[in-house]
Amino acid sequence: ANYSVLDFSLEALLVGREAPLFFSVITTFSAGYFLEDIFVMWNFDEVYDGLAMFHHFLILPSFLMGLFLPGSVALPFHFFFLLEELSTPFLNMKWFWRESPREHQLASVCFAVFFLLSRMVYGTWLFSIASRVWFLDSAELHSLLPTASMHAQFVWQWVMCLVSRVLNLYWTVLIIRKAVGGKATRGPNTNLKKQNYLMKNGVYLPRFPKKK
């Protein structure tokens, strides 16, 4: 596979054995982010989101497979797949700007645009490339995934990615319904008192009891 350019061929996406080191480094940092986000959501009721937790448990095992199991199946796919997270910074901005209606509205619009482009357009296109595996003959399939273990890894990751497509479609419907609703965008409930927040590293984190 040719990794000197943005190669989105099926071979380049699935064969991770010769992928450059920074593919693994960035994917590892991203896996750490998912772990940290799971920890924060589990321990703070204010930011807990069951669907986001479900999403993380879909994606994280696939990342770990590509990083640590023999063959590094789909590691390049995981690296390029991270562009789906372009909407995430704006989601975080919405939370931090929940008491500022104008900024919250701007972050909401940016989140919706980047979500639709990165997840529904780009992510679905990338997934469609990986799905071409099912149309290969046995010889071509064996050249890409020569062992039963590598084949099983791909099947697991493909199914998890398919479920994530359905989840993103559900979120897209919610975003469109909210946009079509015509209601003015404003921050969520801000009745919580400031003493419920803890300043840490220049960022306010919720001071809530741990989930039981």
Image: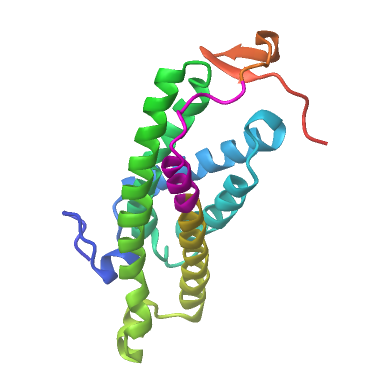
Is residue 140 found inside the magenta-colored segment of the image? no
Residue 3 locus on image (x, y percent): 21, 57
Most extreme residue toward the left, as rendered? 5
Looking at the picture, tell me which residue is in the foreground, 84 or 138. Answer: 84
The residue under the point 30% across, 69% down is 129
Residue 191 locus on image (x, y percent): 66, 16
Residue 67 locus on image (x, y percent): 46, 55
Most extreme residue toward the top, as rendered? 195
Q: Which colour scheme is used?
A: rainbow
Question: Viewed as shown, does residue 79 lie left or right of 5?
Answer: right
Question: Viewed as shown, does residue 85 lie left or right of 7?
Answer: right
Does residue 203 lie above or below 67 as drawn?
Answer: above
The residue under the point 71% across, 32% down is 43
Looking at the picture, tell me which residue is in the foreground, 118 or 15. Answer: 118
Most extreme residue toward the right, as rendered? 212
Work out which quarter of the rendered image holds the N terminus and state it: bottom left
Does residue 200 lie above or below 34 as drawn?
Answer: above
Work out which quarter of the rendered image holds the C terminus and state it: top right
Magenta stretch bounds: 172-189
Question: Viewed as shown, does residue 61 lie left or right of 197?
Answer: left
Does residue 90 lie above or below 5 as drawn?
Answer: above
The answer to which image quadrant residue 5 occupies is bottom left
Question: How many numbered marks, from 0 up?
Answer: 0
The answer to which image quadrant residue 10 occupies is bottom left
The residue under the point 30% across, 62% down is 125
The answer to which image quadrant residue 182 occupies is top left
Looking at the picture, tell me which residue is in the foreground, 63 or 117. Answer: 117
Residue 200 locus on image (x, y percent): 58, 14
Q: Can residue 17 be seen in this view?
A: no
Q: Is residue 152 visible?
A: yes
Question: Viewed as shown, does residue 76 lie left or right of 88?
Answer: left
